[in-house]
Image (cartoon, helix red, strand yellow):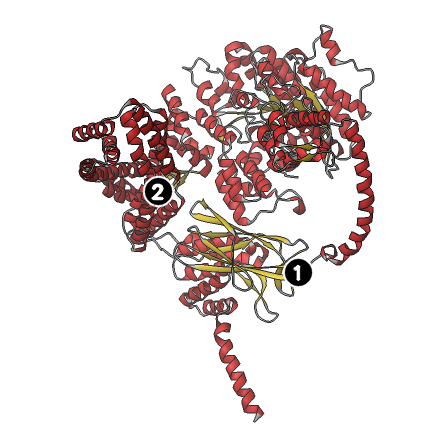
Amino acid sequence: MVRPVAVLLLAFLLGLAAPAWADLWYVHYENAERALAAGEWRRAVEELNQALERKADSGRRVRSYGMKVVDYFPYLKLGIAYHHLGQATAAREAFDTEVRLGVVDQSPEARRELERYQELAKSIPPPEPDGPTPEEITREALAASRQFETQGRLDDAMTALAPALALDPQPVAAREAMARLGAAALAEEERARRAATLGRQLDDARQRLAAGDAPAAARLLREVLLAGENAEARRLLDEAQAMIVADSSAAERRARIDGALTEAAQLEASGQPAAALDRLETVFALEATNPAAREQRTRLTAALEASAQQARVTAGLTSARDHLAAGRFEAALSAANRVLAVERGQSEALVLVRQAYSEISRRLLAAGGSEAVNLPPALRFGGPRQEIDGVLVEVTTNPEFRLTGVAIDRSPVDVRFLDDHGRPLVGTTSSQAVGDYFVTELALGRQLAAGDTTVTVIATDAEGQSSRGEYTVRYRRPWFRSPWPWVVSGAALAAGGVFLLLRRRRRRRHQFERRFNPFIAGAPIFDEALFYGREPLLQRILQTVHNNSLLLHGERRIGKTSLLHQLERRLQRLDDPEFTFVPVFVDLQGTPEERLFAALADAIHDVLKARGLGVPGRPSALDIVQGGGVYSHHELIRELHGWLKSLREASPKRVKLVLLIDEVDELNDYDSRVSQNLRSLFMKRFAENLVAVVAGVRIRKEWEKEGSPWYNFFEEIAVDAIEPEPARRLVVEPVRGLFRFAPGVPERIVELAGGRPFQIQRRCLALVQRLHEEKRRTITLEDVETTAPTGVVSEDGA
Amino acid sequence: MIPYVIGQWVNGDRFYGRAALLAELTSAPARSWWAGLRRIGKTSLLRELDHRAAGDPVHRRWPLVWDFQGLNTATDLADSFGEALLDAEEVLDGLATAVPEDPSLALPELGRRARERGGEVLVLIDEADALLDLVMAAAPAVAALWNALAAAGLRVVVVSSPRLADVGLDSASSRYVPGLAATLGAPHWLGPLADDEAADLLRQSRLPAADRPHLEGAEVEVLRQAAGNHPMLLQMLGKRRAELGSVAAALAHVAADRSVANLFAVDFDLLAPAEREFLVNGAPTEAAERLVAFGLVAPKGGGFEVRSPLLAGWLASDSAPLLIEPRLARQ
């Protein structure tokens, strides 16, 4: 009895399993390989498309079933199938896609096969077009469009132009014509709409006048007059205004004006702009130049216009979508272009335009005899994966995971992300056209739980063809992320913490008694503890300065000098495996041009001397100049030769002398030859050991000129206000434990200072002084508003 | 550390590309002239020749890089020559000891000494556009220079922008440079890198594998095409990709970078009027030949297309026509 039941159960399970088995990517891939071996090319294409729909990222040694691993190069195989079907363009496209995915390079055998077929594909000439060439289509489209435009048939003109842009969106003439036609069609539509409503509005105004509602009538008539002069509307408006004014004494008029203004304000606040405009008509009738009413009318009119514009955009998009769905691509294009004329850059309209162009282009190419095979989107993931038990897995000890990759297709693709249970996840994508392709970058952030997490990515192109990829990440939670070590160490730390807290309180009490004020205004910040908000900028510079000279530009007092000083310190202690940095800070402020090279030379020599590499008995170059002698760039070049040689000999690493030059704007006032001479330092052989980081305010514009010796020499980095969070820390942390801030105070200080560190320091300096004087410990909003900032004020009033 | 270099010249391990050109220059005629647009890598080409010559065991060549930027007078010319000798002191290996200060005398002497040692001096002249100013203030010095450069024992490579060719070879121009064509011959045009060379630069393939930026094949292709293989744009795009972590962000950043717009504007200004008109209007097509050589456009489907989408974007931008029209009007 047991045996038949087992057989039945097995049959049932196999019955369940069979469809799922048949639907796996590797089953389709195996089927495709068999089809290729048997020369069944069409079946191979079908199977490969099925495989790609389930797994679109190529791979070397990918596990299929059991412990079996296969090399998975679906685009290569697809190309081979298309090649044998005589579809050379599609074959080339598939081969190119496989190359773009890059993995094929890891398999010499597959690479050779790919190269062999690429050579074969090259030998097949492209198909002769049956219909007109793209150039002929473009020429005819432009001519037809111009003819329709001269006849005033703007919609027809836009439709006629579509094929030209569908084939190639680059030609300037066609693009400009389409933009012009879109705007003209919109204006024409608006004119027609106004003409159609003119009669209705006049009738409506007459009826309202008859009913005694003069303000509403006046508002309608003013709308009519806005579209153009109209004698009847003008007469009726006079009549309406006379009705409003009639039988009013001066006092009554004043009261009516005030009342109408109040009502209009209330109506505006409650979102009734048209009714608010009605009320304002009473004001205009009684006092035509009332400034409050005019200002409110401008605002209300703009709001109504924006609302009408939004309605036009919505209607246009709906129309474009409907046309597209119904296969009326030229009409869809026309509607979407009108939306773009209303709102330039409207994102959905741009997508619709692209889809319409794509469809028209496909139709044109198909008509021209070209092959129109659509390949499924290709997927490539960015993370570092390794093969574990035949499965590609990224192993991480960081719970913050970010999946990145690209999808490559002929059109922008729609990307969906699914979790292990098939639930949708929210990621980001951005598409970029590259030649004939679109590369869609995809990214997804996830917080990982211990163990394996798999994210499925489904990419769907404009024709609805999909492909899918899976990315598995294994999170190995480090011991320190487990809760128990923290419980033990937390208890131990708590005791120490209490002790430290008590000691710190005592120290702060002393600081308060000594009227401690850590803020500085006027001088550069040397103390790293007071240097906030520039870490990303410093990191960017430190990542770059090995090979590049940099120009830091920003307004006065924004912190450029402090940044250079901090950079000097960081470079001094930077333990780079390859480079030895020798930073030299030079401030050019007040340096006349004849002393420039002497100032640089002495600054460099001082640094070398501190490293034990100075030249004994060397006279100061500045002394030479002050004594009437000359120290030019020739002398500096000669000295630099020797100094850099000494540095190279003294260091096992590559040497970089980093000139940190502040107030470089001084160069603007020098003879241009001085700049040329300074630049010539960086053209010399020893420039391999020399970079500069210069800071200035106005220098950027001067150096953008082609004639400037510094043209495009520096990489420019803007020094702006610091971010709100570090700015808030700059306010709070220097006095933490000493002073308290009422809610909103740090943010208000940052706001008043515009995020500029110098201004923050000035305000905080004054506030701390005041609280010391008043023997208080809490800084209030009132303190902030009533305390003037102190400190040195620069020439520009900062 | 981000390995890309913007603005500064490169050589040695940081120099990518120009393999065919470097091979050609090794056996080129004794004097050759290469003209290219701004930031296309002219100085780096000379510095790479300098680097290779210094370490070349086959040809005995002593390199001397001579920067002409800012030269206005005969004194400038002599001073800059002195600086060049100082700069090359180590590689000249005593060859230039006690040569005259006047380059017109020193160069033949250097050539003579090099021949005595069984080699030649490789004179690498950068920023030769300065000749347009020098010829107005010191025409005899320029004539003497041509004589000196023709001396035996010297091999000369000169780089400039196309303006030197367009103005300096035009005998009707007030800045015509007599002797330029006779000494250097016709200029060769210097264009962008080859596809594989551009990809190598982006990948920084000479670095140890662990130090290379992580770039997918598709990303390299996107960046390479966006730059049109222009070395400075490749370096900028590579650097931004490394800083911002995404190709899309890098492209957006570089497209909005004022220095890139400035580069295009200056390059545009260096072109002949017909070439500018071709870039704007697609005609006349005969103007396309040099643009192809400069790598600004490429043949496509019987016509031409602008190679770099960044340049195409600049040409189609709101600001470009404002920059273009006054220039066209000036011609």
In x, y percent, where is residue A779?
66, 32
Q: Is residue B139 above or below residue A550?
A: above
Q: Which labelled disc corresponds to residue A242?
A: none
Q: Amino acid at mark 2?
A: Gln
Q: Nearer the viewer, residue B140 or A113?
A: A113
The part of the image, by quadrant, that contains residue A485 is: bottom right
Point 49% across, 29% down: residue: B263
* Element marked by disc 2: helix
* Element marked by disc 1: loop
- Name the N-terminal-most of marks 1 and 2: 2
In x, y percent, where is residue A57?
53, 58
Point 80% across, 26% down: residue: A611
In x, y percent, where is residue A480?
74, 54
- For mark 2, what is the residue? A310
Q: Quadrant of the C terminus of chain A?
A: top right
Q: Which labelled disc corresponds to residue A450?
A: 1
